[in-house]
Every structure is written in C-alpha cells, then in structure tokens.
Amino acid sequence: MAQILTNLITNAIKYTPSGGEINIASKIIDDRIRISITDHGIGIPKKDFDIIFDRLYRIGSSGVIKGLGFGLYICQKIIQQLGGTITVESEEGIGSTFSFELPYPNK
C-alpha cells in the first residue's frame, strides 16, 4: 500500500504547478476501501486513457518532467495482486483523479 500511495502522490506533485492543490480522500464502500488522489495539474489526454497504465508511459515527450514511466504500471500490478482496481478521471488543463479500490474487511 505504501508503494501505491508514494507513486500516486509523487505523480500528483510532479504534474501540479507550484502552489497547486493536491487532495487525498478515502471512503469505505461495503467490503472495499476507495482511496483517491486528485491533482490540479496538466491533466491527461483522453486518447491516452487506454495506455496510461502501460510500462514506460509518460505524459507528453518533452522530457520536462522527470521520471521513467513505471509508476502507474507498478501501481496497477500491485493493486491487481491485492484484488483491487485502479481508475483515472482526467481533463487536460484541469487535472486528474486516480482512484483505487482494495478489499477491506468490514468488521
């Protein structure tokens, strides 16, 4: 779980302008927990939604923002191994929300 949060929060920081806001929220839904990280950064083009969790995916190719393109790929693999799912909602110029759900024993 720590690796997932580290990767998603690091991405939010990278893609949010200085002074921008990043929000983290959680919600328990029946037997699952949903955690969402929202940034107010550059957003992701809709044409890339099908490939953002691929290995080596990076937004744009300008090289302005550092990274190797493994973060989202690793997050998805860990979340799947834990029996969960990850989704993205994004709009260019507005920002992105990455949400993941994992099984949560509701006792």
Image (cartoon, helix red, strand yellow):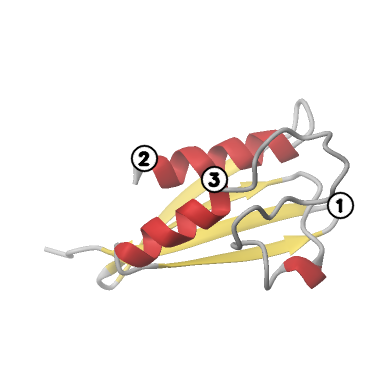
Three-letter residue code for mark 3 = Leu
**How many angstroms separate mark 3 from mark 2 (CA)?**
10 Å
- Where does the image place residue 61, in percent across and percent down from the top left? 85, 47
Please name the residue that numbered disc 2 is placed on.
Answer: 2
* Residue receiving disc 3: 8
* Snapshot quadrant of residue 14: top right
Secondary structure of the residue carrying numbered label 3? helix
Mark 1 lies on residue: 93
CA–CA distance between discs 1 and 3?
18 Å
Q: Position of residue 43 (x, y in %)?
A: 78, 53
State the SS at label 2. Answer: helix
Neighbor class of circle 2 (other Cα within 10 Å; few <14, some 14-19, many 20+) is: few
**Mark 3 / mark 2, whichever is N-terminal:** 2
Q: Relative to the observer, which residue lies in front, 105 or 48?
A: 48
Furthest-left residue in this view: 107
Q: Percent x, y for residue 99?
A: 52, 60
Residue 39 is at least partly visible in this image: yes
* Residue 64 appears left or right of 86: right
Amino acid type of the residue tagged 2 in the rendering? Ala
* x 47%, y 53%: residue: 75
Mark 1 residue type: Gly
- Mark 3 near mark 2, Cβ–Cβ under 8 Å? no
Q: Nearer the viewer, residue 104 or 63?
A: 63
The label nearer to you, 1 versus 3, is: 3
Where residue 24 sits in the image (x, y, percent)?
52, 45
The residue carrying pointer 3 sits among few (fewer than 14), some (14 to 19) or many (20 or more) residues within 10 Å by Cα, namely many
- Residue at mark 1 to residue at mark 2: CA–CA distance: 28 Å
